Image (cartoon, rainbow, N blue to C red):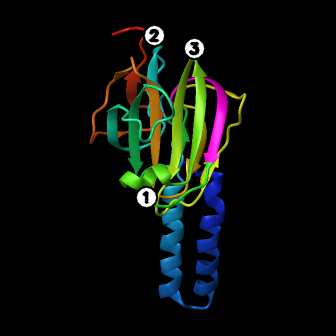
Amino acid sequence: MRIDRAGYPFIAGAMLPALALGTAKRRGVAAAFVLLGGFFAYFFRDPDREVPQEAGLVVSPADGRIMIAGPSDGRWSPPGDWQQITIFLSPMDVHINRAPVGGRITKIDYRPGAFLPAYDQGANDNELNEIWIEHEGRPIVFRQVVGILARRIVCRVSEGDTVQRGDRIGLMKFGSRMDVFLPRETELLVRVGERVVGGETVLARLRSPGAA
């Protein structure tokens, strides 16, 4: 399985001491570093995904569990009237992030902030990276939000880039959260508590503007 390049320093930082300690016959400590290196390799895994091709679908940008699915109450959302889907990623989930829809990236807004647990109500004040995609003339917004363990957001797209649904766009290091904001007329297809798979699980179906 592919390992994302962001994980190489972490893996090397664990395996090199393991090698040195093993050479010094300190096998117990060396084994602990080997296990740590194995965890980092697992965390930064980057599996291929089968992205649904049907028109109008919104796929999950991350692996995890649904925390919120419904009309946004305005506390966490950008200005406007949105449907909100929020996904919590545990440290054991794949942390590669993917584009929920295809289109042109019109805005990227990075905001420094706190490092509260990603599932906490106050996590809206956490460090985040907000990405706007123009999809068939409508904005779709999704946010990479750090948590108590995730201390760095990796974003590998820029304003003006064109992405396809399911494309890799970056990752968040360790436990974190992903918010998706969709037009209010969008039909949501997931519920709170469901597990989703980035790039594969269909979160919603976009409707034409003005649809009931």
Q: Confirm or deny contact between disc 2 and disc 1 (CB under 8 A).
A: no
Give the quadrant of residue 160. top right
Residue underneath mark 1: 91
Residue at x 38%, y 24% (from the top left corner): 204
Residue underneath mark 2: 209
Horizontal and vertical percent position of residue 119: 37, 53
Horizontal and vertical percent position of residue 78: 51, 34
Instruction: Say which label, 3 or 2, has the lower sequence index.
Output: 3
Along the viewing direction, whichever of 136 and 201 lies nearer the viewer: 136
Horizontal and vertical percent position of residue 63: 42, 43
Residue at x 41%, y 12% (from the top left corner): 207
Give the quadrant of residue 105. top right
Residue at x 44%, y 9% (from the top left corner): 208
- Magenta stretch bounds: 100-110
Of badges 3 and 1, the one in the foreground is 3
- Residue 136's mark? 3
Secondary structure under tag 3 reads loop
Q: Is residue 150 above or below residue 23?
A: above
Can residue 116 be found in the magenta stretch? no
Horizontal and vertical percent position of residue 12: 64, 68
Q: Is residue 196 above or below residue 123?
A: above
Secondary structure under tag 2 reads loop
Can residue 106 be found in the magenta stretch? yes
Instruction: Say which label, 2 or 1, has the lower sequence index.
Output: 1
How far apart are the alpha carbons under marks 2 and 1? 38 Å
Query: Does residue 119 appear anywhere in the picture?
Result: no
Q: Residues within 10 Å of mark 3 (few under 14, many from 20)?
A: few
Q: Residues within 10 Å of mark 2 (few under 14, many from 20)?
A: few
Q: Is residue 91 above or below residue 85?
A: below
Instruction: Say which label, 3 or 1, has the lower sequence index.
Output: 1
Along the viewing direction, whichever of 113 and 8 lies nearer the viewer: 113
